[in-house]
Amino acid sequence: MTNAFPPNQQFRLAARPVGMPRREDWDFHEEAVGEAPDGGIVVKVLYLSLDPAMRGWMNEGKSYIRPVAIGEVMRAGGLGVVVASKSPRFAVGDHVAGGTGVQRYWVGQADDKTAFVKIDPAAAPLTAWLNTLGMPGMTAFFGLREVGQPKAGETVVVSGAAGAVGMTVGQVAKKMGCRVVGIAGGLDKCRFVVEELGFDACIDYKAGSVHAGLKEHCPQGVDVYFDNVGGEILDAVLTRINMKARIVICGAISQYNATEKVKGPANYLALLVNRARMEGMVVFDYAPRYAEGVATLAGWMREGSVKSIEYVTGGFERFPEALLMLFEGKNLGKLVLKVADA
Amino acid sequence: MTNAFPPNQQFRLAARPVGMPRREDWDFHEEAVGEAPDGGIVVKVLYLSLDPAMRGWMNEGKSYIRPVAIGEVMRAGGLGVVVASKSPRFAVGDHVAGGTGVQRYWVGQADDKTAFVKIDPAAAPLTAWLNTLGMPGMTAFFGLREVGQPKAGETVVVSGAAGAVGMTVGQVAKKMGCRVVGIAGGLDKCRFVVEELGFDACIDYKAGSVHAGLKEHCPQGVDVYFDNVGGEILDAVLTRINMKARIVICGAISQYNATEKVKGPANYLALLVNRARMEGMVVFDYAPRYAEGVATLAGWMREGSVKSIEYVTGGFERFPEALLMLFEGKNLGKLVLKVADA
């Protein structure tokens, strides 16, 4: 079998990392691009989404999704353009987003599992479909509204505020009439969060005490905390929650590379004192409602009240290093790996 | 001023304990019983309720209720008989329950703050009003039903299963059609929980691994966990929760005397994976609905399907030692201090 495409390149999981993933944990693999199967498609990947959750998928053990197997192409969300199609649903030239994996070409049946959806490149810049109109945006939109349930006038705190999810959480909370305080690492990020994204304040956890920052910027206490980081920041926020506060557990980036046992929130009894709630969320549960989330957020983007900001890096062969940028906190906005030009 | 009563005796808080309260942390005080003020009453205390929460009230710091002040009579729930009345609401001979404090006579205005209520000694044995029909029963009834929200067929796990709250949690969960598994310390307690209270199983955390016990006795996982203890047991249960599980944080007796920092639940990310919830509850929030709880539980007691079991110890002057029994895990059923005969 031959075709017109250059060889496919893939990053496969070679070993389960201990702590931060190293280059040796990856197998760079090259093979010919297969033919589209009957009913299937070939997608040329243009952009890949780099997400903290990817670190979790590399670990063994029960989680909300099965781990990536050793030897398997690393799981990742991506978007691209259909370059071959034997499917009635997709035409060559269509833009699609879905579970492409970390590779240059995706070949297969576009079934429910990979969840490819057509995207409209005219509705928003392509990369926004991996950010505000993609998984991070859906996570923020449904996690905040359905689990956090903020009311106008309440104070919403979000950690990882300059990251993909936090960025949108804060902007949506502003739309809902809340006071919004971000937590992020470094002056650049905090400035970005306040000046670019319009949060009311941002606490730099690298510059000083989060506890003092919360006291200063949340004079009425914290009603909703959207937690992307866990660890000591979660513990600090617990000391400032209000009665009936809601804590959305969305992630724990501070713990993902931990080689020691995860640090539990020592102040969890604040939940008791304040009759408060801590609840986990996984975005996939809201899949039947993504269209609602996309429509709402795209509308807000068009009117200019919500920004989708991506930090695009490249190229494909730098995937291992690019992934680490997430944990080094280098990106302002959603980290996206550019794989190819359209 | 003189009257017919022997001197009042009181335990006042002399010092804030570090770790377990010691005898020196108490001031045994004697004074004449005062006259009932206009509109007020004098109550002769018959029984005092001994509760884990009392340990928390002895600490300084923000909590759901103000700390007991140094020099103040120790706060406690109790019940007794009205021996003098200038109130239109209470007659001499009435039985009442409320915040008597640790003393032989309570004198004052029976206002909202002390929350004295008339109890019917014909409806249930007197001590049941400090147990199933009192605060522990209300905590169990509303905490389980309103926060835990178990459905028939689900598995409910409760720690401190032989204690006042846990005892009723399990029995109410059985009434609701659930599989009920207790966790308690020691063979005697576990036997009591299964044989006397009718739980489906009980895990002896002193005899072996709670994790293995949960695996054996909760083959379908855990849907509701009613937590009275915190610490390692909470962590073990977190590894076995089902999707959309509810964890009721009612107390953390394992941590109340801790001189080191409270141990947070290291496995809290199970909340994320399972889209589960951990929520605190304080019984006072349900005060407007106590009548509903009392009526339901008294009905179940009359039909014999719920038991109110008290462990009565005495006498009054042994209060400091009796309180420690809670933390030594010696009581089967609700610990009650007998102060006087009717």
Image: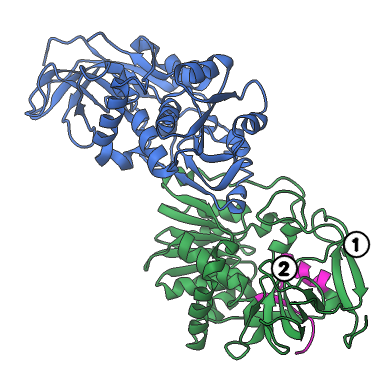
Chain colours: A blue, B green
The quadrant of the rendering that contains the N terminus of chain B is bottom right
Dot 1: few (<14), some (14–19), or many (≥20) neighbours within 10 Å?
few
Residue B162 in picture, x, y percent from top left: 61, 72
Which residue has dot 1 on it?
B24
The region drawn magenta spans: B319-342
Residue A28 in picture, x, y percent from top left: 35, 16
Give the amino acid at mark 2: Leu
Dot 2: few (<14), some (14–19), or many (≥20) neighbours within 10 Å?
some
Question: In this rendering, would B146 be left or right of B190?
Answer: left
For the residue pair A142 and A181, the one nearer the viewer reads as A181
Question: In this rendering, would A177 be left or right of A3?
Answer: right
Earlier-in-chain disc, 1 versus 2: 1
Q: Does the magenta stretch include residue B113?
A: no
For the residue pair B94 and A17, the one nearer the viewer reads as B94
Give the image quarter of residue A287: top left
At 38% from the left and 43% from the top, the residue drawn is: A146
Give the image quarter of residue A138: top left
Question: In this rendering, would A317 be left or right of A30?
Answer: right
Which residue has dot 2 on it?
B326
The answer, for residue B232, to whether it is visible in the render is: yes
For the residue pair A71 and B199, the one nearer the viewer reads as B199
Q: Does the magenta stretch include residue B325?
A: yes
